[in-house]
Image (cartoon, helix red, strand yellow):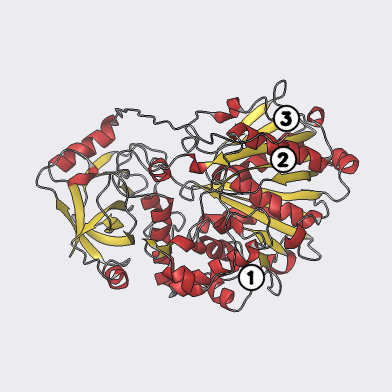
Amino acid sequence: MSSSVAVLGTFQSRFKTQHPELTYVEQAQEAAVGALHSAGMTPDDIDAIVFSLAPTNFMGVADADRWAIDDIFGAGKPIFRVHTGGATGGSAVHAAYNLVRGGMAKRVLIVGAERIAETPDAQKVLNLIFDTFYERDLPLSTNTSVALQASRYMKDFNLTQEDLARVVVRARGNAMRNPNAHLRGEITIDDVLKSPAIAYPLKLFDICPRSSGGAAMIVGDQASAERHCPNPAYINGISSMTETYWLGDRMGPTSRYGYSNLELMGLMAQKCFAQAGIRDPLRQIQVTELYDPYSIIGAMTLEQLGFCSPGTALRLERQGFWDWENGVVAVNPSGGTLCTNPIAVTGLVRAIDAANQVMGRAGQMQRPDVKTAISTAIGGIAQFCNCTVFGTEPVLH
Amino acid sequence: MQPTMEQEYIDDEITLRYRYSLGEVAGKFMNGLREGEILATRCSKSGLTYLPPRSYCERSFERCDEWVRAGLEGVIEASTIVVRGFEGKRPAPVAIAYVRLDGVDSAIANYIDGVELSDLDIAMKTIEPGTRVRVVFAAKREGRMTDFSFLLV
C-alpha cells in the first residue's frame, strides 16, 4: 500500500478588495463546493477538514471557524483550524497531508476565506503582532518590518529601487493570465517608482493588495487519487521551520539566522527538496509559486532555495531569468502574492496554483511540460515559513 | 433567481480595553527607563546579553542570571523611514531603527530623532546600517519605550 498523498481538486475565488455579495462563511462555502466539484466528490467523501484561518481581527469575528462549520459541511467530521499568520495556507496543506499520511483520513478538505478589507483599521491589527511592551509604541507593521529588511539587503548587495520595480512589472504582467488575480495589468518601472512612498525603500506598488476571497483544496491517498483524479499532483515534499519572535535577535554576529536575507527559508527548504529528490532546483523545478507579498521577498526566497547565489536574483531578473515564457524557471505565473493577498488563504492559493500547473489545469497560466512545481509561504514577521513540492509522479519518502 | 442587492453593509465599532501584566523582567526594564538606564539580562552559560531582557536564555535553556546596564551608544542594524503615517503614533515621516547597544547581542527598536527627512535617499544614507547612534532619554519619563529614542552620534 503506497503512502503517497495527492491533490485531487482545487478551487479559488475571484479575489478583490471586498465581496459585498457574500458573507464570510458563504465565501468559504463557495470554495468548499468548488473544490468538491473539481474533485468530483460530495461532502460524504470527505473524512476531515482543515480550516485555513489567520487573524480574525480583520473581519471582527472571533474564531470564525465555528461560524463556518455548517457552510463547509463540517458537522459530524473532525475539523482542525490552522493558523500560522501568512503561512497559514501552506501549514493547512501540511496538516491535511499528515492526516492522510498518518492514516486518520483518506480524503481531506482544506478550506478557508479572507475578509481583510472588512476593517479600515488593518494597520492597527498588524501592529498588534509586535511585542506589546517593547515594539508596539513604534510604527511597526508588516510593511515597515519588510522595509527594514529590504533597506539592509539592498545596501549589502548594492541594488536599486529600479531592481525592485522590475519584479512588480513581471508580477502584474503575469497576473493578466490569471482570471482570479486582484491586481493585474501592464505597468512600467516608472509607474512603480512614482507610486506613493510607504516605508523606505518600499512604495505602494512594491506591496501586495488587501484581498478578499476563498480557496479550497482536496488531498487524498493513492487509492482515492486512482478513483477520483486522472492527473493528480503528488505532494512529494513538505517542510516548515520557525524562527524567533524577536526581530532584534536576528541581527548582529551572534544571531542564529540572518534577518535581512530570509536565511531560515533555505534551511527549511533543504528538507523538502531532499524528500522530493531535488538536488538542482534550477533544472528540476519548472514552476514556482513563491509567497512574495513584497517585491523583495521573492528575490530572497529564490536565493535561499538555491535557484541562484545570494544577492543575484534581482540581477538575473534584469535578464528575464524568472519570466513566464522564456525564463529558466517560471516564477509566479499567477502574479503571486504581490498581486493577490487574502492572508488566511494566500499560502493555500500558492499551493493551488503550483498544483494546478502539475495537473495541467492552470488555464492561460499553464507552462508546458511541468513535472515539478513548488509553493512557499511565510507568516508573522518571517517567524513561520514552509515549502511544498508537487510532482506528476509520486516520490516515496 | 438572482436576488437584487439593496443594502451591502452594516457598520460596527468595537472598543476593547486592556491592562497588560508586565511581569517581573519587563517591569524591571521599565523601572530602569524611569531612572535613565537601559537594563539587559545576561546568561552566563551562553554568554549572550539580551535586549529586550529575557528571563530565560533561548540558546542554553538556562535562566538569565544577571542584569547588566546596556551601553548608551550602539550601532544601527536595520533602519527605515516610515512615510505613510500610523494612527496613534508619531506623525510621519519618522526614522526608526533596530540598534545593537554596546555590550548587547540583540538589537532593540526605537525612533531616531533629529534626522533631516526632506530627501529620503539622503536621509537613508545618514541612518544606514553600521551607523553609530546614542540613546537620549525624554525629560519626563513614564516607564515605557517612548521614554527614550536614538540620536546620531
Return the residue found at the far bottom.
Answer: A319
Mark 3 is on which residue type?
Answer: Ala
Q: Please report whichever mark, 2 or 1, sits nearer to the chain's N-terminal start.
A: 2
Q: Which residue is mark 2?
A: A97
Mark 2 is on which residue type?
Answer: Tyr
- Seen from the viewer's position, the closer of residues B131 and A297 is A297
Q: Which residue is mark 1?
A: A322
Q: Regarding mark 3 in the picture, which secondary structure is present there?
A: strand
- Chain letter of the residue beneath label 2 in the structure image: A
Residue at the spot 59% in from the left edge and 29% down from the top edge: A65
Q: Regarding mark 1 in the picture, which secondary structure is present there?
A: loop
Q: Please report whichever mark, 1 or 3, sits nearer to the chain's N-terminal start.
A: 3
- Chain letter of the residue beneath label 3 in the structure image: A
Whether residue B103 is visible to the viewer of this picture, yes or no, is no
Q: Which mark is residue A48?
A: 3
| Separation of marks 2 and 1 at Cα, in angstroms | 29 Å
